[in-house]
């Protein structure tokens, strides 16, 4: 399995990091062959919609997941699935996800291009 995670904000304790919780939730349900999670909260810190956001960011993430669980699902269905898996994170301060969700075949075509 090829798996990487990237977080660029100064996180609190490792076990409390949202990036880790997101990764665990997605791995448990999607068994991805590739997962990349990047904390993009720093780019949104001054936005009006972020007033009252938790200290330390962890509100905006770019997420790439390659999983056979997406076979036969349309883009909207894939996105809904991931949002459902992360409902507890949205309830605790996650504000936005930028999702790239691919099947292994789609990823292979992109990698071979």
Image: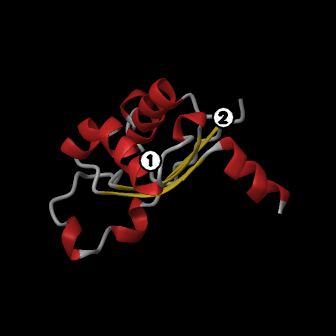
Element at label 1: helix
Residue closer to the observer: 52 or 98: 98
Q: Which residue is disc 2 drawn over? A: 33
Place of residue 48 in the rendered image (x, y in percent of width and height, measured from the top left): 20, 75
Residues packed near mark 1 inside 10 Å, few (<14), some (14 to 19) or many (20 plus): some
Quarter of the image where the C terminus is located: bottom right
Q: How many marks?
A: 2
Q: Determine the residue located farthest toward the front in the rendered image.
A: 72
Q: Nearer the viewer, residue 16 or 110?
A: 110
Percent coordinates x, y for residue 110 in the rendering = 75, 58
Secondary element at image label 2 = loop
Which residue sits furthest top?
28
Whether residue 99 is visible: yes
Left or right: 50 as drawn, with respect to 106: left
Q: What residue do we see at 41% from left, 27% from top?
A: 15
Say which residue label 1 marks.
78
Determine the residue positioned at 45% across, 53% down.
9
Instruction: Report the residue at 45% width, 27% height from top.
Output: 29
Q: Quadrant of residue 109?
A: bottom right
Identified at 56% across, 28% down, the residue is 31
Pinpoint residue 42: horizontal percent, then vertical percent.
41, 64
């Amino acid at each position: 399995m090829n798996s990487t995670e990237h977080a660029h904000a100064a996180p609190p304790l490792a076990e409390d990091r949202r990036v880790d919780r997101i990764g665990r939730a997605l791995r448990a349900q999607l068994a991805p062959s590739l997962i990349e999670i990047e904390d993009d909260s720093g780019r949104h810190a001054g936005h009006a919609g972020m007033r009252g956001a938790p200290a330390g960011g962890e509100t905006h993430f770019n997420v790439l997941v390659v999983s056979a669980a997406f076979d036969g699902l349309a883009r909207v269905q894939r996105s809904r699935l991931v949002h459902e898996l992360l409902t507890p994170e949205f309830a605790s301060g996650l504000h936005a996800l930028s999702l790239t969700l691919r099947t292994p075949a789609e990823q292979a075509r992109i990698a071979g291009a």
